[in-house]
Amino acid sequence: MASKTITALLLLLVESSHTKFISLSNDEILTRVSLSQCIITASRRFFTSDFETVTFSLPLAPVKKSLNSSVLMNHLLLPVVEGEHRWTFLIKNLKLPNYNTREYVYKSYSYIIQIRKEGEFANNIKRLKSFMSWNPHAKFLVVSPTIFPNSHAIAVEVIQELWSHNVINAAVLLTDKTNTTIFNLFSWEPYSNSSCADNFSTTIVIDRCAFGVTDGNRSWFEEKISKEVYNCSVKVKYVEWPPFVNRVDHKNGVPMEQNPGMEVNILNMIANTLNVHLIYNQTSHGFWGHIFENGTATKDLKHLLNNEIDIAIGGYGKTHYRCLYLDCSRSFIQESLVWCVPHEPIIVGFKNMINILRTEVWMLILCVYLVVTFFIWFISYKNIDESRSYKKFLICLQKNFAILIGFAIHILPKTSKVRCILSMFILFSLILNAVYTSYLTSILSTPSYVEKYDKMESIYQHKLKTFFMPNSVYFFQNYEGRKQANKINNVPMSLIMEKFQKCSDISTCLGNITTNKDSAVCLPQLYKQYLANNVNDIRKKMSSVYCLKESLVTIHVNIIMRKGFPLYKSFDDVLKRIISAGFISKWEKDNLEDKRRLAQNLGVDENVSIKYVNLIPVFWMFLVGNLVSALVFVGEHVLYKRTIRMDTHLSQPQTSQPLFLTASSLFAPQLAQPLQVAASTFGLTSVALQPQLPPPLAATSGALFPTQIPRLGAQQLQQAQQEEHGQHRQLRPLGGGRGQQLQPLERFGLDGATVGCLV
């Protein structure tokens, strides 16, 4: 037992003026020794869980000569259990109950209660119930060394009193009249023989103990609840709050069979499993109740405290006081509060296009661009084989920038080193452009704006009216009075409670948001989602409302039961199986995303046809595209006409342009015909031949060379060109502009001759 840590709470319920020490007979001593050893045996078998708190209560009745004293038994019992189990005894005064619930509140999981006379147990149990450690689901062992004339009647009285305080797991150890050292153990089965914990005649003797030895190995605290409880009634009070309790038949006040809500589905499945009959009643208060620090409550929670109902449902969240004074089931889903504000978008502009890549990525791209440009320029600068374009740094910058943004360059490098560097840079630019284009397409296809009220802080900075649902105030209980948590999303709790306004009608509150745009509503997320998907009027208003993504407060939704509800453990075990089987997720989807049921109940046609209003943007885009195409066509037509006129003007013959020829041979009569073709090609009216002759032959030059070449027409010129080159292409005449270089005319058959054109 050294590995187990057990704490016992010794409750001295005796008044100091009544404490007396009297002498005891041998039989009385043996009775107390036997009872002490039986309690020690019970503590070894049933009260030895790790970190368990055991409450040990002394009798309240004063000591008289006619009554047996418990002083000797305490001297025998307490030292043994302290030495063997290492119990720590804490002495408290029950006359001054402490309600300081902000400190840690322990729960007793086992009770050992002594009684001296008939009728005293009721006062004893009331005293114990006044403590925060009260736990009706604990194990209760009631003992007495007194010899009662009718021990069965005393056991029934004790069990009935415990049942009135919602305790069912109890055992009563009383003295046998025939042998005072033998103690009979009484217990009961509340749901046996088709009874619903209302038949106390089932109290029977299940075991006997003498000096710590029992007749058998039967458990004194066996399971009191069978698998089926024979259609016993359970009273349920509900608040109509979707998606937990959705639709109510107002004629008989019960939830409808078709999709009644998540919590109704849970209770119905538990009832079918345990064979329990549920009696539903809608609350007459409209909304949830509240429970306070001193244990008082309002509305449905007050009915639970007074044991008037068994269960309350309707989206109740777990709070400190609810779980302290009532029984809370395990949480089956989380609910959170969100803000819904006016939808006022602010255009972002080109900011998103810049923010596609982070600043450090832009800087890295710039560095790569400059480094590659520098290396290309540095390698090409002193290389005589490289193109002149790459020997100028500014031109290199221009060409690399064109590659970076995805444009082609016309002059490629000639050397292998520059080509290698430029190829890697082209590959880098290709990948970069692909990534940037994909992100840019994604951004341009989505709205480029941000909401004006995108955080909870902005709601209070713009001084909007803040409305809350009636039950929302209970979500902030855990934040009240805590210095380390006096802010929610950077908004002080004092400011939240100062601006707090109740919203009694969600449709009206959402209407104020869409029309006045001066208020905000805080409502549960699941509730908002249900209304937006299932209520036609709310859906239309939600289209003009923006709900923040950040949640305000997250709570755990659970089922609230009265303190000591006898089926609490059975309900909680079945709920655990329901959660593990995935029914909660299914019911959540059915309640929040059932579009077909919405169309049937609200008369909304799911097959929405396309109307002319939906196609207006398409027609506008078509019209603008046609206008732009027409403007481009007109511009191209005008530019083409102008180009034709300029080409016609340049193709006309120039009579004022003389052509001087130099021949290397003075005697070349075969040059006449090729020269005529060349003159026609250049569009000259006549060709003046001035041969470079020696002075003696200058006088006879006119006889040797003709002074003019006949003028050729355009058709003859084109035919001559085709015959000369053998291909259908028009030669561009030389001499049409200034600064044109001389070209060799070997194609005209001028062997050893060069024709020069001087303008």
Image: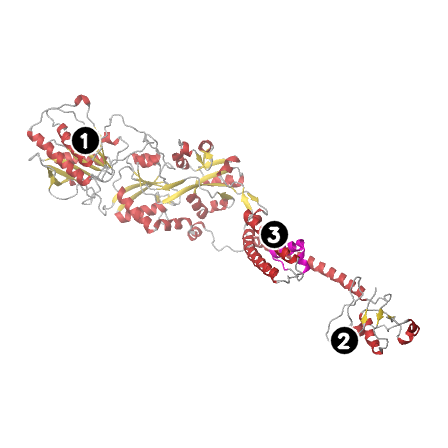
x, y percent for residue 186: 15, 38
Q: Which mark is residue 370?
A: 3
Q: Where is 533 relative to 476, above or below?
A: below
For the N terminus, the image quarter is: top left
| 507 with respect to 205 (left or right) | right
**Which stretch did the figure color magenta?**
387-408
Q: Which mark is residue 121?
A: 1
Label 3 sits on what residue type? Leu
Label 2 sits on what residue type? Glu
Q: Where is 57 relative to 409, above or below?
A: above
Frontmost residue, 89 versus 290: 89
Frontmost residue, 188 versus 602: 188
Q: Which mark is first along the chain, 2 or 1?
A: 1
Frontmost residue, 196 versus 124: 124
Q: Which mark is residue 724?
A: 2
Residue at screen point 18% across, 21% down: 17
x, y percent for residue 562: 29, 38
Frontmost residue, 58 versus 731: 731
